[in-house]
Amino acid sequence: MMNQKAKKLVLGMGNDILSDDGIGLMLVRDLANRINDQDVKFEISCCGGLEIMELIKGFKTVVFVDAIRTRNGSPGEVYYFRPSDFRETSHLSNLHDINFLTSIKLGTALDLDLPDDLHIIATEIIEDMEFSDELTPPLKEKYPEILEKVLDIVNGIILT
Amino acid sequence: MNEKSKILVIEDDTDLVAAIMKILENKGYSAASASDPDEGFEKMKQNKPDLIILDVMFGSKGESRGFEFAQKMRNDKQFADIPILMMTAINTEKPLFNFSPETDGEFLPVDAFLEKPVKSDDLYLKVDELLKQKTSKWRNWPQKEE
């Protein structure tokens, strides 16, 4: 799963023990088994904020795979956006640390070797405040479909 | 109850810490974490918490440092009054850990137990109860007052 010389990083964010919150981790584990490209490294992390900088520095392209809860979203819906149209996902916002955009701005100001090509894929979830190592039934049912959508998007990014 | 009650989580399982902190912050609490008892004590000195959520076992060898930490706290006048919610895994998978809160709890200077795997409802209930309680019942430990 790990490739130290990879130029592109697919980073799953979330927490396996908070039900749907772990969907980003599940997706990246499955993507790692579906994508065979020496230039791509797959990683997972439960942390947001400043720790992200440490994970992403040195890569040219980073694809974040996270969960999101929007007001009118439909569970299982997959969103794709760039930092320019940034919406806070579950872990790219961080209540006890600083948020994603602030991390990037700080890292750039500190002259860290941060990627200039950032992509964010987020899946609309239902539950992330209950301890459970399983997805909620609606997301579990839609998971194969979600995985295919995310795979298509990631392939589109890493093949360009 | 103060919406910004400060809670310090002392636990070495990073996933569990992240999950608990997310849930606590979502409920309006201010949460901080420490990965072992020593770091926990340092953080307490910097910013005294209203409640401590404490694991029992730390490290790969499963040292039961949570017990020592609880006793050390009760012997420190500065921190003796802080309630402790101790997380325990009461199971048979850890043969080194035969402690049972039901039988041994009264000998430990902690205020309540949270069974692992943690359930959100238990966490909310016990955190709320202990913050309302405000002061540990073991604040004068080892001289028991109750």
Image (tube, helix red, strand yellow):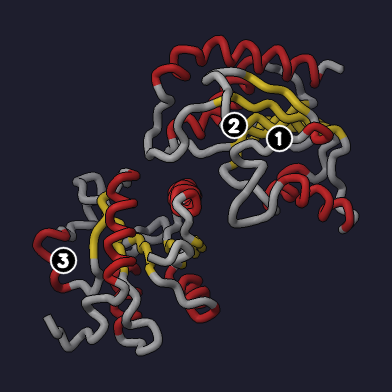
Residue A90 in sight in this render: yes
For the residues beneath circles 3 and 2, the answer to whether they share a chain is no
Element under disc 1? loop
Q: Nearer the viewer, mark 3 or mark 1?
A: 1
- A84 sits left or right of B27 in the view: right
| Total labels drawn | 3
- Residue under label 2: A68
User: x%, y% of residue A61?
Assistant: 82, 32
- B90 sits left or right of A99 in the view: left
- Residue under label 1: A87
Residue A6 in sight in this render: no
Q: Circles 2 and 1: CB distance less than 8 Å? A: yes
For the residues beneath circles 2 and 1, the answer to whether they share a chain is yes
Q: Which residue type carries mark 2?
A: Ile
Chain letter of mark 3 equals B
- Residue A75 bears which disc, if any? none
Chain letter of mark 1 equals A
